[in-house]
Amino acid sequence: MTDAAARPYRSVLYIPGSKERALEKATTLACDAIIFDLEDAVAVDEKVNARATLIKALTEADYGARARIVRINGLDTEWGRDDVLAMAEAVHNGAKIDAILIPKVSMKGDLDAVANLINGMPLWAMMETAMGMLNAAEIAAHPRLEGMVMGTNDLAKELQSRFRADRLPLVTGLGLCLLAAKTYGRIIVDGVYNAFKDDEGLKVECDQGRDMGFDGKTLIHPAQLDVANAAFAPSEAETDLARRQIAAFDAAQAEGLGVAVVDGKIVENLHIVTARQVLAKAEAIAALAN
């Protein structure tokens, strides 16, 4: 497991790169990661100033252990190339940036184009187009890719699908991206829930995403942080079961047995792998609080 994969991504909060107060407040919020947005959250006439405002914050502000991900404008816009070059220069001058997030990634070439402009920086891909869903495997296989973010609003728009609480119209795309991410060991974060005052609806969608295998959820408002953090963290019951499974399996192996029984269920080596992952995630979350 890489350092990036070991870091929790339960709550990934979008922050407009143009809003100084929001950038300052983000240093105090209980999010695991921040997407500093230069794309959708920034008006056209603020694009250039937002870039400078964000670089200042990433150079001077203390975001602690939070992952710092910058979403650039697409390279097909007049701002995208300059966004990438400006972030590269900012890092050289002391700004702390963990990754560049590329919007509307539809094929491997979209990653290549950014990779050729900035050396060494991990790349993340917004998965929000129909073509991106079909090419999820080749995108996930890119050697510079570290994570994938579902852009469910844009995907729904492109599919011309209707909203459903169960997200049935999006399940195929979500599943394709999950399969690709898990195959290549990439982080993958679920899309946003738009009704930021609806905690119950958010919890349902977070639970669905966690059950599917997402590492966390992107959020549009700080009010959503507590729900996401709780949903994507191992519960006390899960950590207790993991410890008991490991102890029982170790005892069984000491007796020359290949399986153990916990709570009336067979425990094999594959269950121990999962149990250790649960405990590692719980420990990583606890470390964030220290």
Image: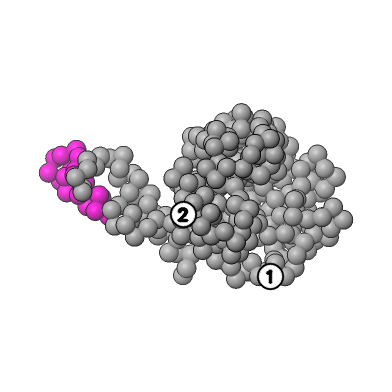
Colour pattern of the rendering = one colour
Is disc 1 surrounded by few (<14), some (14 to 19) or many (20+) residues within 10 Å? some
Residue range in magenta is 243-261
Q: Which residue is mark 2?
A: 232
Q: Name the foreground residue: 254 vs 285.
A: 285
Kindly identify the amino acid type of the residue bearing the numbered disc 1.
Glu
Give residue 188's quadrant in the image. top right
Which secondary structure class fits the magenta region best? helix
Kindly identify the amino acid type of the residue bearing the numbered disc 2.
Phe
Camera sees residue 112: no
The kind of secondary structure element at disc 2 is loop
- In percent of width and height, residue 280 lies at 39, 54
Residue most extreme to the left: 255
Camera sees residue 252: yes
Q: Which residue is mark 1?
A: 24
Is disc 2 surrounded by few (<14), some (14 to 19) or many (20+) residues within 10 Å? many
